[in-house]
Image (cartoon, rainbow, N blue to C red):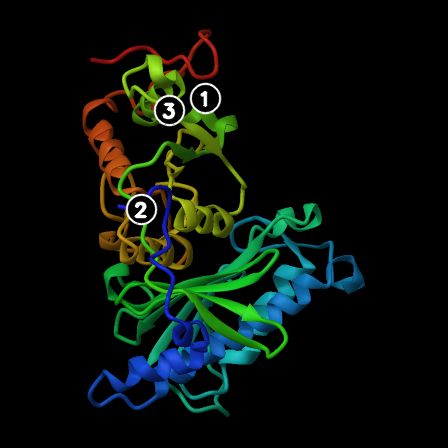
Amino acid sequence: MMARGAAAASPPPDAMEQTLTEFLIGEQRKAPGATGGFTALVNDVRLACKRISYLVGKGALAGGARGYVGTENVQGEAQTRLDVAADAIFRRTCEWGGTLAAMLSEESAEPYPIPAQYPQGDYLLAFDPLDGSSNIDANAPVGSIFSVLRDSERKFLQPGTQQVCAGYAIYGPTTMLVLTLGQGTHGFTLDREIGEFILTHPGLRITEETSEFAINASNARFWEPAVGHYVQECLAGKSGARGRDFNMRWIASLVADVHRILMRGGVYLYPRDARDATRHGRLRLLYEANPIAMVIEQAGGLASTGTQRVLEVEPRALHERCGLIFGAKREVERLERYHREHNERAYDAPLFAARGLFRAESRA
């Protein structure tokens, strides 16, 4: 087992030079009867991410591309100009290639049908065009998340187990595209000199245990008892039930947090909370939780709502939300157990009363 985090042993020199396109063609050749349509689709997603990376990387030099546009998306969230621009880039880049039947974006209430002048394809693409955009002015990492399904009668309302590809791009000091086709999770770094994504992190793996967790502590008063119980144990450190110290990290960008966990290990919690009893969580199932869950599980981790494997959730609505806990397998399993054993009062009382932010009552 590796000591800290996620990356497999260094690849041989020839693997370091493999481009994403070469990787995809190699995988295509392993699939009898493959037509190349899927490879073309992932290459279109690759190009969309490159274009967004360029736009994000201009920062304040982009001028009118930054700031808010005065509108809200279907989620009720204020849209930035970069949100709108990134959404348009995904559509324009992926609509014409003849690989897609429709697209679903965080920024639109309804699916986007492929225009009639373009060939119709066999796949569906769901995406969050610019995750973390509210942090863009702080120059924090942002990214794009995507999920590919085969077209079916259920259209986008398929469980995550039906994904044929999932991944994200992170736009930070370097731009990386992290991808799974269902046979492991692999990271590609954008070489800006040649304009290609190069395979730099093949076979990413997450260690089963960790001493690092990520959660938004400002929501503590809304947490389920199971989550409060877990966090209290972690904060107790060596003198507590866990017998070791934990570090807490929170970037407030899903892509940035998942990338850190892939690179160095950890567990991430954005659980269901008491703010809105009609919602099953805060993150969107189809184009956030499902693709991230596939990436994590293909890297040896686990992704759960707290009570159920994320990839097995049957979606009921296009923009359905869910709780999301992912990362080190044993920590996620512990949290699932706590949801069974320490969650008997999920929404019926203030979690921490007057005893302080992280001091919950002991529950046998």
Look at the numbered disc 2 and give the secondary structure of its residue: loop
* Foreground disc of the pair 1, 3: 3
- Closer to us: 123 or 58: 58
Query: CA–CA distance between discs 3 and 2?
Result: 25 Å
For the C terminus, the image quarter is top left
Q: Residue at x 24, y 37 (%)?
A: 330
How would you rate the neighbour count of disc 1 (Cα within 10 Å): few for under 14, some for 14-19, many for 20 or more? many
Residue at which label 2 appears:
2
Q: Residue at x 22, y 90 (%)?
A: 33
Residue 196, x across and y down, in percent: 54, 77
Going from N to C along the chain, the mark reached first, 1 or 3, is 1
Left or right of 78? Residue 331 is: left
Give the residue type that dot 3 points to. Val
Mark 3 in CB contact with mark 2 (< 8 angstroms): no
Seen at 36% across and 59% down, the residue is: 291
Residue located beneath label 3 in the image: 231
Percent across and percent down for residue 187 are 42, 63
- Residue 80: assigned label: none
**Residue underneath mark 1:** 221
Secondary structure beneath label 3: helix
- Of badges 3 and 2, nearer the viewer stands 2
Any part of residue 85 in sight: yes
Q: In which image quadrant can residue 264 be found? A: top left
Residue type marked 1: Arg
Residue at x-position 28% and y-position 58%: 298
Q: Position of residue 289 (x, y in %)?
A: 37, 52
Relative to 302, say whether 215 is above or below.
Answer: above
